Image (tube, helix red, strand yellow):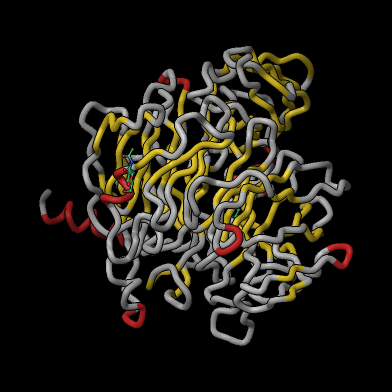
Amino acid sequence: MNPTKLLGFIFLIFIFSSLGDAGGGSWELLLQNAGIASMHTALTHFGTLVLLDRTDIGASLLNLPDGTCRNDPLDLMLKHDCSAHSVLYDPSTNTVRPLTILTDTWCSSGQFMPDGTLLQTGGDYDGATKIRTFTPCDPSGTCDWVESSTQFLQEARWYATNQLLPEGQQIIIGGRRAFNYEFLPFSSLGLVNFTLLAATNDPEEDNLYPFVHLLPDGTLFIFANRDSIVLDYNTNTVLKTLPTIPGEPRNYPSAGSSVLLPLLSANQFLTAEILVCGGAQYGAYLNPSQQLLCSSTCGRIMVTDAAPIWSMETMPINRCMGDMIILPSQDILIINGAQQGSQGWGDASNPAFTPVLYSPYATVGFRFTTLTPGTIPRMYHSTANLLPDGRIFLAGSNPHQFYSFNVEFPTELRLEAFSPPYLNDTQSVMKPTIVAAPQQVNYGAPLTILITTPVVLTGLIEVNLVSSPFVTHSFAQGQRLLSLDSSGPVQTAENTYEITATAPLTPMIAPPSYYMLFAVNQGIPSIAAWVQLLAPI
Ligand SMILES: *[C@@H]1O[C@H](CO)[C@@H](O)[C@H](O)[C@H]1NC(C)=O
Ligand SMILES: *[C@@H]1O[C@H](CO)[C@@H](O)[C@H](O)[C@H]1NC(C)=O
């Protein structure tokens, strides 16, 4: 490159980096006081959100229903506590209903089962081996947590990761000093030793909340600290050992985040790419007073290649504790977190207010767009979940061990929503509306939907299925997007079109569960319809 070109290039970079929040997006405060500071959040197929805190944090600002109280002589703050530590939020009425959770869910894990029941496991103290279920109901119903007193995890799991498997079971991997995995419902495999977790343990214990992604061939990608493998979980065989990612440790307490990039029918669902972004410098957790800068890098790897390598990219903003959310448009939103420090009580500062959009199919160097910054710090113990209307639901942030309100970063009870740029009114003319869609579909079956649009369609409509993950500690457990093969649109009436897609061929591509089905017109998504992928008989 000659000097003139080089100068021009530098100028271009300057223009792009000075655009600031040019990418748009908008914020709204939903509720001033949710009662609890959610550290685990999941969206049910009734459109309600389950929010979970921990039970030994002191009194929340909402009481348990029916005068229920907990008496726990081991509790850290309140041995007699009548307040709720889980709530159900209903976006349609903007209200919360207290739920009854009695054992400690602190740093627990979870995921939805094929029938839409939320399975939630582990935690600390009396919750360490607990198995809990929440079977969602109509928003007017009274569904609540059930905590099993007969079945327990085989290992105490604090900071584990769950993943729904093609067979409809969940695998529960790791946790503090738990270098093994197990299955629910129980499998004859029992408790299986897992060497990756022992090998990636360091004095900070940077191997917690491992990043787990189900690959489309039914194997698991598992990442801890800076190392990752592809595992056959049935035989506990390591099928591939991936190179160490450059840069910082990426898992708890040095949390970055990770997503499985959209799985595409255009590639016959044969390829799988992982993106890992952010993290904390090694030592940030051990020496919090230094407030070291968080990582500025993302690593991207095509796991299905014969010899995969990490391609590194630089984010516009240093970030740890960011949440990575797959949008229905197939872009990745990086939101929440801090620019200095690490996870842990009081261990971070300099909130990362500005969300960043990552466009996976854009040219390297042009993939990141900074969006409109928020105003509420969402650091340790905050969450982000995609809603069926395309907004991002944001909850929690409690950088303190107990509820604390008169401090620099108070315990956060406010609920917010962020609207990505695709919800901008100026584009509503492009927005499809789903007027008919099946509620259930079998693997490989035709999936026919009817949409309306304000304008005549000129191109293909994407049909994308997005799972509803269990979000905690900057990682969305079980998150995936399937971009289906679709034909049409065939006009059937004025402004009305029929589109026929093909449901995923196998439960390895998409395990049986409820998914949000979005019709996407040139990057602008419809409101989702829920569709259940039925387990093969
Ligand atoms: C919506 O789009 C218009 C036109 O591009 C832009 O001027 C405006 O700032 C956008 N608003 C938001 C909230 O992104
Ligand atoms: C699993 O690990 C434990 C603890 O390191 C060890 O005692 C046990 O023998 C191992 N089991 C197997 C089957 O390797």
* Drawn side of residue 302 relative to residue 529, left or right: left
User: The C terminus is located in which quarter?
Assistant: top right
Residue 268 appears anywhere in the view: yes
Q: Nearer the viewer, residue 289 or 354?
A: 289
Q: Nearer the viewer, residue 123 or 284?
A: 123
* Drawn side of residue 100 relative to residue 224, left or right: right
Residue 471 percent across, percent down from the top left: 56, 51
The quarter of the image that holds ligand 2 is top left
Quarter location, residue 489: top right
Residue 379 percent across, percent down from the top left: 51, 68
Image: 281 above or below 504: below
Image: 349 above or below 319: below
Q: What residue is at 55 percent from the left and 71 percent from the top?
A: 377
Quarter location, residue 225: bottom left
Quarter location, residue 104: bottom right
Residue 421 appears anywhere in the view: no
* Drawn side of residue 405 relative to residue 320, left or right: right
Q: Nearer the viewer, residue 107 or 394?
A: 107
